[in-house]
Image: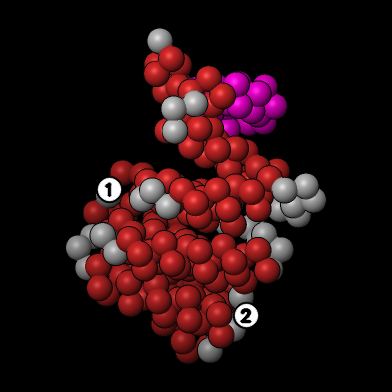
């Protein structure tokens, strides 16, 4: 159907968007925008809000990454508004992640952080949808980097409380940030113990690599 073709175009645009992140690739950005615009034109003709929000998100990231920040932010804001209005929770979370991160990366720290917090609250209310792990990582990173450590502690406590309904990966993310806070506050030995325990129970290779990287920083500070 036309709708499936429109979503296929948007999915292709999304694949090019990932290539932009990896390599800073001008041609990938151009392809992302081109396929996204095709998907968007079809979605608008069909009145399909899901394809619209998806395509606008891709286009917004590509524009923001390649010198058209205001145009990119505008597309990302529209993507979020459409997803909220059409009640598309996975697309809402994705829009919060990309809009919040782009604003933060371009110096609008308070607004970026505010949107990521809104996104986390939204995702929590909707049962920790796909994408909330990525959102949590962004939120913890920014709260740590900007010194919003009390807010970070609250997120850590929320995720580590008994009976927390979200996925196990969330506990792994926040435990690493608990270790980072311990280390930053001069409790390197406690941070080491926490990370070594976490590493023993780690699942996939990527997870192990992230924990090992933090452990290396802690080991260096102990020696």
Residue 141 in the figure: left or right of residue 198: left
Can residue 74 be spotted in the picture?
yes
Which segment is the magenta one? 192-215
Instruction: Choose between 70 and 193: the one closer to the eye.
Output: 193
Instruction: Choose between 60 and 150: the one closer to the eye.
Output: 150
Q: Position of residue 56 (x, y in %)?
A: 41, 73
Q: Is residue 209 magenta?
A: yes
Residue at disc 1, secondary structure: loop
Q: Is the residue 162 above or below the residue 131 in the image?
A: above
Callout 2 crowding tier (Cα within 10 Å): few <14, some 14–19, many ≥20: few
Q: Earlier in the sequence, mark 2 or mark 1?
A: 1
User: Outermost residue, top direction?
Assistant: 223
Q: Are marks 2 and 1 in contact (CB under 8 Å)?
A: no
Q: Residue at x 50, y 82 (%)?
A: 82
Instruction: Choose between 110 and 137: the one closer to the eye.
Output: 110
Q: Residue at x 54, y 26 (%)?
A: 191
Q: Position of residue 95 (x, y in %)?
A: 48, 68
Magenta stretch: dominant secondary structure: helix
Q: Position of residue 6 (x, y in %)?
A: 51, 74
Residue at disc 2, secondary structure: loop
Q: Residue at x 65, y 53 (%)?
A: 158
Q: Which residue is mark 2?
A: 87
Callout 1 crowding tier (Cα within 10 Å): few <14, some 14–19, many ≥20: few
Q: Position of residue 63 (x, y in %)?
A: 28, 66
Q: Which residue is mark 1?
A: 24
Whole-number angstrom distance, CA of label 2 to CA of label 1: 33 Å
User: Outermost residue, right direction?
Assistant: 163
Q: Nearer the viewer, mark 2 or mark 1?
A: 2
Q: For residue 128, what is the image quadrant?
A: bottom right
Can residue 134 be spotted in the picture?
no
Residue 79 in the figure: left or right of residue 195: left
Q: Quadrant of the C terminus?
A: top left
């Amino acid at each position: 159907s036309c709708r499936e073709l429109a979503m296929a175009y948007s999915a292709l645009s999304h694949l090019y968007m990932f290539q932009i992140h990896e390599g800073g690739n001008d041609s990938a950005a151009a392809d992302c925008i081109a396929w996204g615009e095709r998907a968007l034109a079809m979605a608008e003709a069909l009145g399909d809000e899901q394809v619209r929000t998806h395509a606008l998100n891709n286009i917004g990231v590509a524009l923001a990454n390649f010198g058209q920040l205001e145009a990119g932010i505008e597309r990302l804001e529209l993507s979020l508004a459409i997803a909220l209005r059409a009640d598309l929770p996975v697309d809402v979370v994705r829009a919060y992640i990309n809009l919040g991160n782009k604003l933060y990366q371009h110096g609008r720290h308070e607004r970026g952080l505010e949107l990521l917090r809104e996104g986390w609250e939204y995702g929590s209310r909707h049962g920790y949808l796909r994408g909330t792990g990525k959102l949590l990582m962004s939120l913890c990173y920014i709260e740590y980097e900007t010194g919003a450590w009390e807010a970070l502690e609250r997120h850590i406590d929320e995720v580590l409380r008994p009976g927390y309904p979200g996925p196990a990966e969330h506990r792994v993310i926040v435990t690493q940030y608990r270790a980072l806070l311990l280390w930053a506050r001069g409790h390197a030995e406690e941070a080491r113990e926490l990370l070594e325990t976490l590493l023993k129970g780690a699942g996939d290779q990527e997870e192990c690599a992230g924990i090992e990287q933090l452990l290396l920083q802690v080991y260096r500070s102990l020696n």
